[in-house]
């Protein structure tokens, strides 16, 4: 049986995240992974998997995903959930400059 490569494995979380910083740390980490190509376009992002990866509940993960959707980095697709949005070169440069 073939093992499916999980792009979330490219995200490394070294220390426990304080609860009051969870949303912003998750958002920043995912934004960096999307912009530098570790999470390619079309990658499905699962809340439960992220919650386990970061060692938090699903609430800060959900909030971070909403922020990234508002920034145009994620799209919510019916029956699939959050998916990394295609980056157009101009948009990615503008997004990076805003950071």
Image: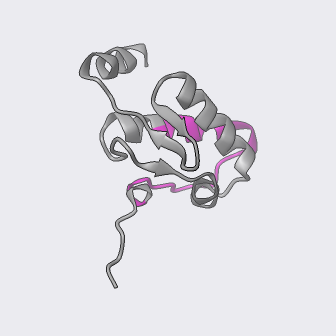
Q: Residue at x 70, y 45 (%)?
A: 18
Q: Is residue 42 above or below residue 89?
A: below
- Which image quadrant for residue 53? bottom right
The reply, left or right, for residue 69 in relation to residue 99 is: right
- Is residue 95 shown left or right of residue 80? left
Q: Is residue 5 above or below residue 72?
A: below
Q: Quadrant of the C terminus?
A: top left
Q: Could you tell me which residue is drawn at 51 percent across and 54 percent down? A: 13
Q: Is residue 70 left or right of residue 83?
A: right
| Horizontal arrangement in the rendering, residue 57 relative to residue 55 (left or right) | right
Read off the magenta span. Answer: 9-30
Q: Is residue 21 magenta?
A: yes
Q: As displayed, is residue 77 above or below residue 56?
A: above
> How has the structure been colored for display?
one colour
74 drawn magenta: no
**Residue 98 horizontal/vertical position (percent):** 42, 14
Residue at 38% x, 38% y is: 34
Q: Main secondary structure of the magenta part?
A: helix
Q: Position of residue 21 (x, y in %)?
A: 68, 37
Q: Residue furthest bottom?
A: 1
């Amino acid at each position: 049986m073939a093992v499916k490569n999980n792009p979330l494995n490219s995200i490394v979380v070294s220390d426990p995240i304080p609860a009051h910083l969870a949303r912003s740390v998750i958002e920043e980490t995912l934004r960096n992974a999307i912009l530098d190509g570790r999470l390619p376009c079309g990658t499905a992002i699962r809340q439960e998997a992220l919650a386990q990866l970061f060692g938090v509940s699903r609430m800060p993960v959900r909030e971070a995903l909403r922020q990234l959707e508002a920034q145009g980095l994620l799209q919510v697709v019916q029956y699939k959930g959050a998916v990394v949005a295609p980056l157009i070169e101009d948009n990615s440069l503008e997004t990076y400059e805003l950071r």
